[in-house]
Image: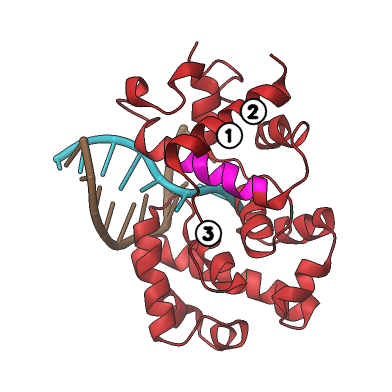
Chain colours: A red, B brown, C cyan
Amino acid sequence: MDRTSLLESYYSSMLSELGPSQWWPGETPFEIAVGAILTQNTNWKNVAKAIDQLKAANALSVDAMSALSAERLAELIQPSGFFRLKAKRLRAFLALLNDEYDGQLEALAQEDCATAREKLLAVNGIGPETADSILLYALGQPSFVVDAYTRRILSRHGLLPEDVPYDELRDFFMDVLPEDASLFNEFHALIVRVGKQWCRKSKPLCDECPLATFLP
DNA sequence: ATCCAGTGGA
DNA sequence: TCCACGGGAT
């Protein structure tokens, strides 16, 4: 089977077994972008707490968050872990928006996908996964997101070596899938759900996995 | 390879 | 207790 049909089968198997994901949780593009930074190597439940605190402090806008000191911002996002580091990263992201896009996330979304990706990657603290998450889930751009779950599932299925570089893993999908943001959105969301519940790092539950038929 | 550094589930 | 977590920089 060619890669295109294979990935389509993965997608339809997960979708039919799990149902649609309705990702990403978040009411505004800015909130989603903030969540993408906060969730780096961190459980989403911790991020949700941090976002609640940002909301309670009315800090979930470019202007309001830009007005906060690094210390105050760190305090608000504390439950997400790495809070001093992430406060710096959020401020570096805000600096990009304020300095180059007049504080408008929508203006960044007007760039073509590759340009916006370069701009995001140039921010200290935004790496490829965070950049792609912002592009796809906050800006609606067709940039496929891959993560540790994607890597784990595909390597356990014998499709790619486990240490494959990020961009090669991303191209594994983008080279053959139609450039469709809503497809990329749902595909990645389904992979994360499978990774969390079945393809766990230790003690994976292969027997009950929605992707069990694809195992080598 | 090591640091960042809180939280919840196994 | 221990480990893993929608990673990234140094």
Residue to which mark 3 is pinned = A24
Residue to which mark 2 is pinned = A7
Q: Residue at left 37%, top 78%?
A: A53
Residue A75 visible in image = no
Name the chain under label 3: A
Q: Main secondary structure of the magenta part?
A: helix
Secondary element under disc 1, as helix, strand or loop, is: helix
Q: Residue at left 64%, top 75%?
A: A94
Q: Could you say where residue A197 lies in the image, as x and y percent from the top left?
A: 35, 37
Which amino acid type is marked by label 2?
A: Leu
Contact (Cβ within 8 Å) of mark 1 with mark 2? yes
Which amino acid type is marked by label 3?
A: Trp
Residue to which mark 1 is pinned = A11
Determine if the magenta segment contains residue A154. no
The answer to whether residue A193 is above or below residue A40 is: above
Residue A188 visible in image = yes
The answer to whether residue A46 is above or below residue A61 is: above
Secondary element under disc 3, as helix, strand or loop, is: loop
Q: Could you say where residue A82 lies in the image, as x and y percent from the top left?
A: 42, 60
Q: CA distance from mark 1 to mark 2?
A: 6 Å
Name the chain under label 1: A
Give, as a single range, the part of the protein colored magenta: A183-193
Within-10-Å neighbours for mark 2: few <14, some 14–19, many 20+: some
Q: CA distance from mark 3 to mark 1?
A: 18 Å
Please name whichever residue, A148 or A212, is drawn nearer the observer in this view of the structure: A212
